[in-house]
Amino acid sequence: MTEPTDIAERALSTDSEDLEEFAEQIADQVRSFLISVRDIAAQPDEDGVDEGLASLPYLLLEVSQLLLAGGRLGAFEDFVPEERFESDAGPDPDLDAMRDRLAALFEGLDEYAEVFDPYAAPPEITVNRLSDDLTAIATDLVHGLAHYEDGRVVEALWWWQFSYVSTWGAAASAVLRAIQSLIAHDRLEPAHDAETEATDRELVEVAEEVVQRR
């Protein structure tokens, strides 16, 4: 029987022959997330359609898959680039337009409350925005992708791992909880259409009449 420590040592080793395959899998998930967020932000406005709510299931899936990739990165021992200083990955893309589009898409849903550090005493409650967090995550990911596509595999893994621990991991976790909450509210709270609201008003009026007669 294989000892758990042996499994952990294999899972955390950066000397594995599968390192290239591992990096490719992370890069594929990064691309999938970036494509999905950009596609959601590029949706045209349609009258009578709440595109923000409609996009939540897709975001739930993509953020969940991205966090799985982040968990795999976090489980590895620290990646160490060959060079002492980070290679120039070129200018980061300007994602302000995407941020603005996401903010408009999630109007009324964009802001949410989050516990910044659950181990702080007392815990600090912050107000975040889905549009800001999704854009910040994308910025971190695309920076590492530039390293990967230039052939600097270890440097890409180092950046994705470092930024997962320091920034985008916490941001993605917060976004996931916010999306889960929005979906729960949308699906679990009873819908009130015009007919239901009219019936509710009639019931209230009848109850008021009964009280007045007493």
Image: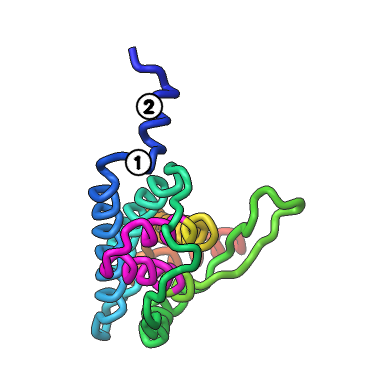
Distance between the alpha carbons at the discs numbered 2 and 1: 14 Å
What's the amino acid at mark 2? Ile
Mark number for residue 15? 1
* Mark 2 Cα-neighbour bin, 10 Å: few <14, some 14–19, many ≥20: few
Residue at 58% over, 61% down: 114
**How far across and down, in percent of the image, does residue 117 sit?**
64, 55
Is residue 137 a member of the stretch shown in magenta? Answer: yes
**How far across and down, in percent of the image, does residue 80 sit?**
45, 53
In the image, taking residue 165 as reference, residue 22 lies left or right, namely left
Q: Is residue 195 above or below residue 1?
A: below
User: Observer-nearest residue: 38 or 180?
Assistant: 38
Q: Image quarter for residue 14?
A: top left
**How far across and down, in percent of the image, does residue 180 sit?**
42, 55
Report the span colored magenta: 136-161
Q: Secondary structure at mark 1?
A: loop
Specify whether residue 189 is in view.
no
Color theme of the render: rainbow
The quadrant of the picture occupied by the C terminus is bottom right
Q: Secondary structure at mark 2?
A: helix
The quadrant of the picture occupied by the N terminus is top left
Is residue 83 a member of the stretch shown in magenta? Answer: no
User: Observer-nearest residue: 45 or 196?
Assistant: 45
Choose mark 2 or mark 1, whichever is in front: 1
Mark number for residue 7? 2
